[in-house]
Image (tube, rainbow, N blue to C red):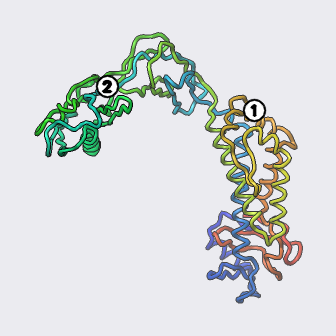
């Protein structure tokens, strides 16, 4: 009898019942019983077996998918690259990476916000300003915020400055305060900077005293740098400006300026290394999940055999894997050595290992993929028949996670195939 697995559970159950193939499902303990043995204590498939087979099927499917990525797509992914990331980083956000063309970008000036650098005061000297509660007003973006700070007898300059810094940062305005300490000179200075870059006047700010003299005493009311725009050019063309250091270069490429430079930065298509690294991380994770599920199932010889097969497959390539930054811990699980993998990626060894092995019948990726695919298709082959009991008179049931299970038996209690 053939059953369409796309049918709903209700209609499928009806079909089974009408063909006198109904199966009793004990919802309390999630075990399965054929109609003639539907009593407590005669389970035909334990929930532990179902959980184990679900685990290895899920892990093996993920392993197959990650290996497929590593056999080509992961290393063929392209993105935009910068020849000098200290000056400028780039990001490609489109879906046609083959359309990326090279360009030269010269950064003459980065964008910055207004800055007020306060007076350099002797850090451990007594604060000489007004004692008690001082109030300063900071106006930015057309809004004025008043901030109160206390100064007491015996306070040092650094103590009062730190209170000001904390009060300004807690005010929730577009002005960031920093206390700059020079331990060698024994001085401390408050630096105020707009969190919004650009020369637009609405991004500027003013600081003044309302009560007391804390703003003037610390010098934060003096502007030391006006807000400025980024200045750059593309391919030697006309000068362009931007309020922000993040600019659109065209072709779905976004650049972030870090510093000015007398030399142009080359933006060009390059390999998207994140795609291959993500695929490798997925492979390692899914391999470890599959190995762990089998290795931890110590009561089942077939599960232990699967763990041994996984170990024997990867051990053949332990030297080559170690060379590209994939090693193994004492339990047999994979681990990544990021530093070694970075070097292998830069030299091209990482890509060569995966792409070359995918084309060999007995290569690492082919062997591991074949094993994973077999586990994914036939997880029941990796569970001993002793886990199922005997007198199995039916060949269909529902799993504890709602999927249809089909069993084919050569004889009572022995599994030929197991499919979701």
Return the disc, 2 or 1, that comes first in the chain's sequence.
Answer: 2
Q: Quadrant of the N terminus?
A: bottom right
Total numbered circles = 2
Q: Can you identify the residue that label 2 sits on?
A: 198
Q: Position of residue 136 (x, y in %)?
A: 16, 38
Residue 341 is drawn in which quadrant? top right
Q: Residue furthest left?
A: 211
The answer to which of 5 and 373 lies nearer the viewer is: 373
Res 208 label: none
Q: Can you identify the residue that label 1 sits on?
A: 349
Left or right: 272 in relation to 184? right
The answer to which of 312 and 267 lies nearer the viewer is: 312
Q: Residue furthest bottom?
A: 39
Residue ID at (81%, 45%) = 318
Q: Say if residue 356 shows up in the picture.
A: yes
Q: Secondary structure at mark 2?
A: loop
Residue ID at (87%, 42%) = 361
For label 2, the crowd category at 10 Å Cα-Cα, with few meaning under 14, some 14 to 19 and many 20 or more, is many
Q: Quadrant of the C terminus?
A: bottom right
- The answer to whether 73 is drawn above or below residue 66 in the figure is above
């Amino acid at each position: 009898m053939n059953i369409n697995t796309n049918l709903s559970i209700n209609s499928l159950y009806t079909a089974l019942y009408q063909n006198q193939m109904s199966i009793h499902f004990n919802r309390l303990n999630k075990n399965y019983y054929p109609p003639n043995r539907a009593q407590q204590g005669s389970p035909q498939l334990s929930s532990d077996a179902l959980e184990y087979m679900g685990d290895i099927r899920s892990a093996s499917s993920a392993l197959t998918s990650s290996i497929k990525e590593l056999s080509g797509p992961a290393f063929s992914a392209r993105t935009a690259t910068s020849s000098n990331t200290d000056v400028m980083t780039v990001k490609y956000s489109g879906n046609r990476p083959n359309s990326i063309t090279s360009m030269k970008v010269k950064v003459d000036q980065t964008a910055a916000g207004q800055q007020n650098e306060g007076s350099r005061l002797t850090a451990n000297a007594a604060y000489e300003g007004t004692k008690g509660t001082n109030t300063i007003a900071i106006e930015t973006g057309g809004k004025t915020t008043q901030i109160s700070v206390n100064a007491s007898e015996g306070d040092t300059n650094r103590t009062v400055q730190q209170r000001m810094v904390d009060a300004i940062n807690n005010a929730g305005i577009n002005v960031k305060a920093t206390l700059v300490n020079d331990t060698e000179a024994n001085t401390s200075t408050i630096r105020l900077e707009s969190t919004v870059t650009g020369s637009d006047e609405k991004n500027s700010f003013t600081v003044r005293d309302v009560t007391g003299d804390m703003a003037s005493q610390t010098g934060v009311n003096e502007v030391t740098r006006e807000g400025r725009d980024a200045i750059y050019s593309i391919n030697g063309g006309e000068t362009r400006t931007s309020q922000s250091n993040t600019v659109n270069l065209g072709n779905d490429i976004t650049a972030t300026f870090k510093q000015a430079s007398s030399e142009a930065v080359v933006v060009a298509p390059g390999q998207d290394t994140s795609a291959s690294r993500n695929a490798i991380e997925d492979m390692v994770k899914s391999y470890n999940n599959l190995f762990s599920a089998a290795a931890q199932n110590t009561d089942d010889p077939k599960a232990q055999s699967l763990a041994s097969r996984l170990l024997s497959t990867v051990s053949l390539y332990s030297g080559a894997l170690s060379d590209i930054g994939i090693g193994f811990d004492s339990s047999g699980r994979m681990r990544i050595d990021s530093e070694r993998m970075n070097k292998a990626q830069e030299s091209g060894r990482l890509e060569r290992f995966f792409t070359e092995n995918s084309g060999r019948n007995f290569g690492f990726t082919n062997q591991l993929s074949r094993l994973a695919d077999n586990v994914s298709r036939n997880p029941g082959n990796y569970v001993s028949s002793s886990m199922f009991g005997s007198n199995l008179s039916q060949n269909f049931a529902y799993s504890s996670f709602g999927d249809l299970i089909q069993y084919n038996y050569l004889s009572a209690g022995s599994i030929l195939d197991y499919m979701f």
